[in-house]
Image (cartoon, coloured by chain):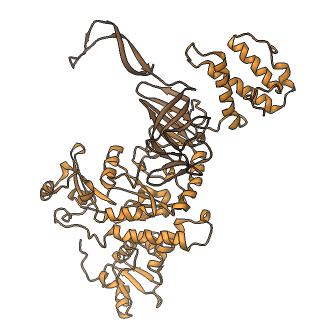
Amino acid sequence: GRHGFVVAITGIENIGKGLIREGTGYVTFPVKYQCVVFRPFKGEILEAVVTMVNKMGFFAEAGPVQIFVSNHLIPDDMEFQSGDMPNYTTSDGSVKIQKDSEVRLKIIGTRVDATEIFCIGTIKDDFLGVINDPAAA
Amino acid sequence: MMSLVTDSPVHSSSSDDFASYLDAQLGSGSTGTSGSSADDETDNESDHESERIKRRKAEKLEILEEPEGSTSHEYSEQILDSEQIVETTIKQDSCSHPGSFGGMCMRCGKSLEEKSGVTFGYIHKGLWLANDEIARLRKTDMKNLLRYKKLYLILDLDHTLLNSTSLAHISSDEEHLRGKVDSREDVSKGSLFILEHMHTMTKLRPFVRTFLKEASEMFEMYIYTMGDRSYALEMAKLLDPKREYFHERVISRDDGTQRHQKGLDVVLGQESYVLILDDTEQAWTKHKDNLLLMERYHYFASSCQQFGFSCKSLSEMETDENEGDGALATVIGVLKRVHTIFFHELEDELAGRDVRQVLKTLRKEVLEGCKIIFSRVFPTHFPARQHQLWKMAEQLGATCTVDLDDSVTHVVATDAGTEKSRWAVKEKKSLVHPRWIEASFYFWKRQPEESFSVDQKASS
């Protein structure tokens, strides 16, 4: 929804009168409810799982949120390597980002519409980048 | 430019102004100079510029729906952060907006109206790239090319790598196939599949698995079909069950920029390194030089009918294209030659090499040394030089002429009784059916003239 991704409904305030739809016989009720929503904010730091890596950057997801980190916002010392498992690697090979890697990134733009949440992220700042990698800084 | 991260007291005037501006905005009491306008006038252009950009960033953060718990200290840290980002990417106005995801610039996060660029929905939903960025990516990919010694290969699906038919169009003679389909469990072993939910039966072309394996070592491969996206993805699963050949490089008609044309604008590789395998020349009018035209694969009866053939189809005759010397086996040989020549025989710099040139050269070897004259092959008032066959023969390296003299080596005719035909027989020149030219074209090799003699009735 436009407020974010509904994680759980915490309470129902009231349920209005039902309206029978023409033709199908289904009934529609207007419901007022409270819920917990999840939505990303610009400037927020998130942890996400990498889903796809290519020459333009990489895509990651954090729950229902799709994040794209362009190679413009990946540190310059990381280079794209194509192949069976495309990845971004530092010149000394110590840090590698590939599918299923966990990364900490910062959101620099978000868009929420009725069915999807898109984000632009960066890992160019301090303390951002791969987590769970024993060789990482 | 100074860096605000250090708390040193050495500021340029803009830094003072900024701090005070911040204080004023956050309402936490200010002690600095009230306005910055007086100082601004004495600053130079770049200071003024970065001041404006910092203001813009500060304003943007105002809109942030941050929880009330944030202190002004945190705000200023965030602004310092974004200020650093702005400073590292500083241009006269702002970011160059190389592309967008979900409508937001992928570099600065701002909402973008699309300028000139291309949507790359097949790579990931919501992805769009500006033309400059596409050009830049194509160039930088050259490094990968050289490192892995791979060119780009675009593959068509229908009639090139496989043949599909709607279940509704299966002929009575083909019904027996229903019992012979291969399991979808382990696709790599089979070649005939039914996709119930798409009402389609698909037959993979003989040799296709070997072809893909060998081609993948020389090329980064793309699928490009005029089918819709769901069809394209299903076929990719059949051809590439381990997702090792194509990854996300599956382009369908939903991804093309033009209605009935295929184009290289949605391919992230330089045109001079791209080869295309397709059975339909008209789909690639802008890129004919990159195209290796394939002989159509007609397995099902509906396919034969669609193209006007009245013979029994391969499926009905329970036979198939020969694996060893069929179209795919032939073309992989040509691709290997192009690859070898490109990477090991060309002398100029990688940036200057062009795969289209290599193709042209290879084609010209096929009928090198032949001088051809046509007899009653073209309609009476048709300009000979414009004819398909004439142009095809010239592409293959032959010389075509309208003047009959002794240097002619081949007479192409359908009727053995014409004047030129009889001349050919008398002078011991080759008399061949036009199919000889076409066959040489599709096999990339000069065909034996005896197989195309003219008194033979054309067999289907």
Q: Tell me what residue is drawn at x 81 percent, y 32 percent.
A: B45
Residue B396 placement (x, y as % from top left): 45, 75
Please state which of residues B193 and A80 is positioned toward the viewer in this rendering. A80
Residue B344 placement (x, y as % from top left): 54, 72
Image colour assigned to chain A = brown
Visible residue check, residue B200: yes
Task: State the count of labels.
Answer: 0
Q: Tell me what residue is drawn at x 23 percent, y 17 percent.
A: A26
In the image, farthest residue toward the right: B42
Residue B295 placement (x, y as % from top left): 34, 66
Q: Is residue B367 left or right of residue B240?
A: right
The C terminus of chain B: image quadrant = bottom left
Q: Is residue B252 left or right of residue B28?
A: left
Please state which of residues B341 and B274 is positioned toward the viewer in this rendering. B341
Q: Tell me what residue is drawn at x 78 percent, y 32 percent.
A: B2
Residue B452 placement (x, y as % from top left): 31, 81
* Above or below, comparing residue B191 to residue B54 in the picture: below
Visible residue check, residue B381: no
* Above or below, comparing residue A18 to residue B78 in the picture: above
Q: Is residue B78 left or right of residue B389?
A: right
The N terminus of chain B: image quadrant = top right
Please state which of residues B36 and B250 is positioned toward the viewer in this rendering. B36
Q: Quadrant of residue B443?
A: bottom left
In the image, farthest residue toward the front: A134
The chain drawn in orange is: B
